[in-house]
Amino acid sequence: MLTQLSAGNFKSWKQIEKMRLAPITGLFGTNSSGKTSILQLLLMLKQTIESSDRAQVLEFGDEKSLTNLGSFRDAVFEHVKPGTMNFSLDWSLAKQLSVKDPASNTNTLFTVDQLSFECVVGENGADRLAVSNLAYNAGDYHFELKRKGQSGAKYELMGQGPNIRLVRTQGRVWDLPSPVKFYGFPDQVYAYFQNAGFLSDLQLAFENLFGRLYYLGPLREFPQRHYAWKGSEPSDMGRRGERVVDAMLASRQRGPYISPGKNKRRQTLEERVAYWLKELGLIHDFEVEAIAEGNNIYQVRVQKTPSSAKVLITDVGFGVSQILPVLVLCYYVPEGSIILLEQPEIHLHPSVQSGLADVFVDAMKNRKIQIIVESHSEHLLRRLQRRVADETITPEQTALYFCEATDNGSRLTGLELDLFGAIKNWPKDFFGDEFGVMAAITKAAMERKKVQRP
């Protein structure tokens, strides 16, 4: 689980300083206030890690990528030249990482359940992007790859911590080359140093972190009357939820694997999704069925009420097809995953927006899913406050933020929740001037009554 994020000079953010990330993290604020940019930073790192180009420092993407940021000049704060960008992440590990002492066959150098990574990238003077330095921190240990001088591609490796001294291989005193992408130690590290093999464990842990990160964008595919399934098992729903039916069909082979709570019978993915669709008041039931036995063409049929006929998903309100990828993603991805959601409330009734918060709480508590959501929904926020008040979740299990645009870039304000779910530092006009609107309505009504009097 991601626990902290810092960034500098990324898009509209001049600085994000030690932003706490909780199991449920909510980003709220006005349009163009920087909310989406925080998600885009994580998506940029993910698509870089998954890129086949080991020499590409950062992958800014294109129309087919998770995010399309253009170029470094487009993504750096105020588009300055030459520009630099920095970011750091802290995360907790699913299980402890134990690293053996290179100087001993039996001793352990360190055991940690939390790691951090930091990096600075910038232009190298020739309009090319280069890593200035990258570093991993594991408890009391710090391992850093740093560029020598302001230009060029020569690097040095440093290690600090108890009982550790990186030892050069005899006769191999050459400088190290550029890192792999923005986070990887070059292969020469393991040849030039006698006892640096464990550094690959840190790099692998970072790759595993982003391998568990999934994303669903704000725009969904229109529902279809027929879906062709070729037996694939997608890793996620796709940016627009286009693989949602594939995921539901693939999950049938797993059988019941979703726990709805302690001492409750495990459910299949379809059962859990059907439960929430009914709980949210959208439909009574739904099923994915083949149009004929042995056929790979499927239909999604829904039943609005217990007594109504089943109809195709295309013949009911748009809200069902909009929320379906959100629900499926929460229960399809492996336990312990991280989900990024952009405006999941689009096209949903206010009561359903409120219910989404309960879906997130359920996925967090029963599947250890971390959810980072960017939203404009007051109803979603209010339900999270209510769940803190009724002790379903604790204030520590949420991290809620208000983003706003200023003359000096975006600004992040952490919303302080007390034990009763109240926000102690509610920003001015957070969701508009509600009091002012009510006062204006009352004043207008009084004026009309004066005019209508005989």
Image (spheres, grey):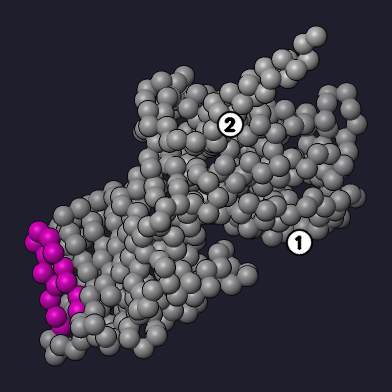
The type of residue carrying mark 2 is His
Reply above or below: 105 against 224.
below
Instruction: Identify the residue at horizontal 82%, vertical 43% (top origin).
Output: 313
Instruction: Identify the residue at horizontal 45%, vertical 21% (top origin).
Output: 389
Mark 1 element type: loop
Reply above or below: 5 against 271.
below
Q: Is residue 428 visible?
A: yes
State yes or no: discs 1 and 2 in contact (Cβ < 8 Å). no
Task: List the residue tagged with mark 2.
Answer: 379
**Residue 366 colored in magenta in the image:** no
Answer with mark 1 or mark 2, whichever residue precedes in sequence. 1
The type of residue carrying mark 1 is Lys
How far is mark 1 from mark 2, CA to CA? 39 Å
Q: Position of residue 30 (x, y in %)?
A: 53, 46
257 relative position to 91: left or right: right
Q: Please name the predominant secondary structure of the magenta segment in the image.
A: loop
Nearest the viewer among 24 and 28 is: 28
Nearest the viewer among 174 and 124 is: 124
The magenta stretch is: 156-169
Task: List the residue tagged with mark 1.
Answer: 230
Farthest residue to the left: give it. 163
Farthest residue to the front: give it. 454
Reply above or below: 194 against 428.
below
Instruction: Identify the residue at horizontal 30%, vertical 50% (top origin).
Output: 18
Q: Position of residue 394 (x, y in %)?
A: 40, 28
**Residue 158 colored in magenta in the image:** yes
